[in-house]
Image: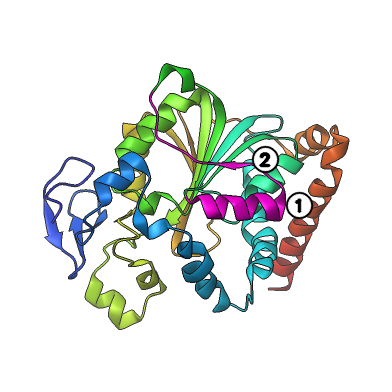
Amino acid sequence: MNQQCWCGRDDLHAWNTEYTMCRSCGTLIDNTSEYNAAYVENFCNPLYDQDYWYKKMLQEYQKIGCKNFDDVILYHFRERAAYWMHYLLKHLLPPATVIEIGCGVGTFAYWLRQLGFDVTATELNPAWRSFVRKKLAIEVSDYQLSSSPENCARYDAVFMMDVFEHLANPLDMTAALCNELKEDGIIMLQMPQVPDDAEYSRLLEQKASFLRYLLPGEHVRLYTVLAARRLMMRAGFRYMLFYPSIFHDDMFFIASRRPLKYYDDDMIRQTVLANPHAVAAYAALENFRRLVAQTQKNA
């Protein structure tokens, strides 16, 4: 069992047979994994081989009606990529230089590029990187944690969507982000949110949807909002803004070491449409916004 939380406290208690909880920050810690350290340092967790997407993740998407990865890609464009883009543009405009760590099926990186951002997309598995390259015609590279001066202050933004829960030592990652981000750069994260005052027995009784995130060996750290705030503050990201998440048991936020910039709709529209290659991508985003507004009106 891991005897200490990332926050430095060792006041842990058994939450269930597979996770312990830090009494100080509320982080849930997987106590079953044997290869956590190797994954954090080398990004070589054997769980994330080519079968992770081709088999495991496809099976998950089939539960919501996706027959194949064409369906998954379209689903992501309609839902997650559009949602994230809507909030990102409030704080960052093209042609900013950005990196997505763990790009998944690549839809967010693709849309970023279409809107004029200078995008680096990364994924762990070589076979999966090749698949995304061929499917969406975007470059996808490997990613290694780095603190070298050559990588200092390269990016205006880092995106990690549904990635942080896979990291055994988040402090290594936040240190790398501090190194690679410009001083006023932002990070945008989505990850599962541990409910406040979470008791395993009560969640079981309620059949809480959060229980689906308990995946030992895969989700090795799960965070409360308090834990996420402390983690960001420790890394120097003093300014945090939480937005509504797509799924009610996730958290979604943007953080920075400097006060966040804000752009209104007119500025966003003017900036993006100055690039003739971005018109179609922006029109698709506008369509998403209209559909959301209509749905909320009819609710």
Question: Which residue is denoted by mark 2 in the rendering?
Answer: 89
Q: Residue at x 25, y 45 (%)?
A: 37
Residue 254: in sight, yes or no? yes
Please tell me whether residue 288 is drawn above or below residue 122 in the rendered image: below
Looking at the picture, how far across and down is residue 91, in whole percent? 62, 36
Asked which quadrant contains residue 68, the reply is bottom right
The kind of secondary structure element at disc 2 is: loop
Query: Within the image, what quadrant is residue 58 found in?
Result: bottom right
State the residue position of label 1: 285
Queried whether the magenta region covers residue 6, the answer comes back as no
Asked whether 127 falls inside the magenta stretch, the response is: yes
Task: Indicate the secondary structure of the residue bearing disc 1.
Answer: helix
Query: Depth check: 284 or 104 in front?
Result: 104
Q: Residue at x 56, y 61 (%)?
A: 246
Q: Which amino acid does label 1 sit on?
A: Leu
Q: Which residue lies furthest to the top in this view?
A: 149
Dots 2, 1 in contact, CB < 8 A: yes
